[in-house]
Amino acid sequence: MSHETLCLIWFFLLAILIIGYSILDGFDLGVGILHLTARGDTERRTMMTSIGPTWDGNEVWLLTFGGAMFAAFPEAYATVFSGFYIAFMLLLFSLIFRAVSLEVRSKSESLAWRKTWDAAFSISSFVAALLFGVAAGNIIAGMAIDETRTFTGTIINQLMPYPIVIGLLSVALFAMHGAIYAHLKTEGDLQHRIAAWMWRTYIAFIVLYIVATAYTLIAHPSAMTTLNAHPWLWIVPVVNILAIANIGREIRLGRSPRAFAMSCITIALLLVLFSIAIFPNLVISSLNPDWNITIYNAASSSKTLTTMFIIVLIGMPLVLIYTAVVYRVFHGKVKLDESSY
């Protein structure tokens, strides 16, 4: 297998990993964002318990993505993680606070204690979702990368309007995804209120999707280069729009499982579009396109890529089987008991 082919395979595998993470941990983040809309201790315990058996396993997909990028494209990994150092520290703290909130929130009967960790859970979920979108926006817009592949900008450069819009789109998308998932897992008054939040987050997502799309077409038309070069790829945005429209239809008809499936497809196709927009780049230099970090000039040796690919062929089916079993075991409505969060 040629080195170029291995590079393409690993670009594809990284896309699969980030899609898997976004779909699975996306509803975890969404449930967290909407956590404070629940009323009373029982409802908030229900919200946490809805993701309790799976949230930590979902985050493994992000860790695997980071490890795979480090091994397959080490130069891109070094540039991205050094360039987004502050953002990644904030993300790390957000994910830590989410985990701690889930584990310690119900360890005390104190109302102040529980409210504090409820707020920490919701705020950290919002921040994590926002940071993922801001990072994606910066990748599309380009970063201040010089000829040595070193980030020369500042945190202010990463907080320009376009990345912020993509960050807010990410928040709305995950909030909608989480609302649909929570509707599947709850009953009674809580489920009824979540139904209203499904509509609110869906409308917010639609508005931000239109704004982000228009902003991208106007400010960053280079993102359309690959689509225009290969017209058959236009099937991706077309199907994406149909999936987004169908989310509202399924919500209106009260078919939450189908709405959740459409939400998963929407997330997957948005990330496919993101991959198409940046291909074959991993990091785009806003200073000089000749300094872009691509899948070809940042890749490890063929031997490394081949060895890793063999490991993936063995390990990925096991991960998928484990994930399927966990979701099969914990399917159905949330029932609180002594072991619940």
Image (cartoon, grey):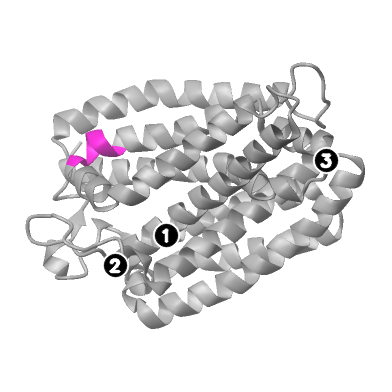
> SS of the residue at dot 1?
helix
Q: Quadrant of the N terminus?
A: top left
Provide residue 81's location: percent of width, then percent of height: 26, 46
| In the image, farthest residue toward the bottom | 218
Q: Tell how many labels.
A: 3
Q: Main secondary structure of the magenta part?
A: helix
Amino acid type shown at disc 1: Val
According to the image, label 3 marks what residue?
A: 40
* Range of residues picked out in magenta: 69-74
According to the image, label 2 marks what residue?
A: 157
The answer to whether any part of residue 277 appears in the image is: no
> SS of the residue at dot 2?
helix
Provide residue 315's location: percent of width, then percent of height: 41, 22
The answer to whether any part of residue 67 appears in the image is: yes
Q: Earlier in the sequence, mark 1 or mark 3?
A: 3
Q: CA distance from mark 1 to mark 3?
A: 33 Å
Q: CA distance from mark 2 to mark 1?
A: 11 Å
Q: Nearer the viewer, residue 175 or 24?
A: 175
Amino acid type shown at disc 2: Asn
* Residue at point 82%, 25% (across, down): 336
> SS of the residue at dot 3?
helix
According to the image, label 1 marks what residue?
A: 134
* Residue at point 76%, 51% (across, down): 37
In this picture, is 260 found above or below 164? above
Query: Nearer the observer, disc 1 or disc 3?
Result: 3
